[in-house]
Image (cartoon, grey):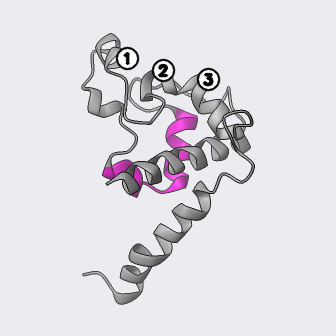
Amino acid sequence: MIRPLQAAVVLFLLPALLILLSIPGSESKENPSPGRKLFEANCAQCHGSNGKGSMEAAKTLKIDPVQLDITRDWVIRESAKNLEKRVSDGHGKMPKQGVKFSPVEIRSLIRYIRSLQLAYALKG
């Protein structure tokens, strides 16, 4: 059973946090955030530039394309810590990135992924 405090966190604080994480500040196409740069250079080829996944990558990897969609509900509900671990240690056919990226870079990548998830959720 969900307690009132848990419901308040889920209904009010989590969306507010996602909005704060997605505020790009000075980010633009000409001046992308570090997380966006990392995503575009290392993740978009499989996860797609919008996070919805790439059909071509799914065919190459011989997996269901939905597995590459990082805007799915279960990925959105995943804690930032768990997402950081998945990126660092790898997951399924996704290679380990912990040797390639620093913890700070991984956190900036997760912030950018959260902004993609929020953009998708707002489109409804």
**Region in magenta:** 73-89
Give the farthest residue toward the bottom.
Answer: 4
Residue annotated with mark 2: 45
Q: Is residue 30 above or below residue 114?
A: above
Going by the image, does 42 lie left or right of 11? Answer: right
Pointers 1 and 2 in contact (C-beta within 8 Å):
yes
Quadrant where the C terminus is found in the figure: bottom left
Compared to residue 20, the image places residue 81 above or below, namely: above
Residue to which mark 1 is pinned: 57
Where is residue 95 drawn, in percent x and y? 50, 24
Tell which of 110 and 116 is nearer to you: 116
Q: For mark 3, what is the residue?
A: 41
At x 31%, y 32%, the residue is: 67
Instruction: Specify whether residue 83 is painted magenta.
Output: yes
Q: Nearer the viewer, residue 37 or 83?
A: 37
Q: Position of residue 109 (x, y in %)?
A: 61, 41
Q: Give the image quarter of residue 17.
A: bottom right
Residue 112 appears in the picture as rendered: yes
What is the three-letter code of the residue carrying label 1? Ala
**Residue at 58 percent of width and 36 percent of height:** 88
Q: Residues within 10 Å of mark 2 (few under 14, many from 20)?
A: some
Q: Which mark is residue 77?
A: none
CA distance for labels 3 and 2: 8 Å
Q: Main secondary structure of the magenta part?
A: helix
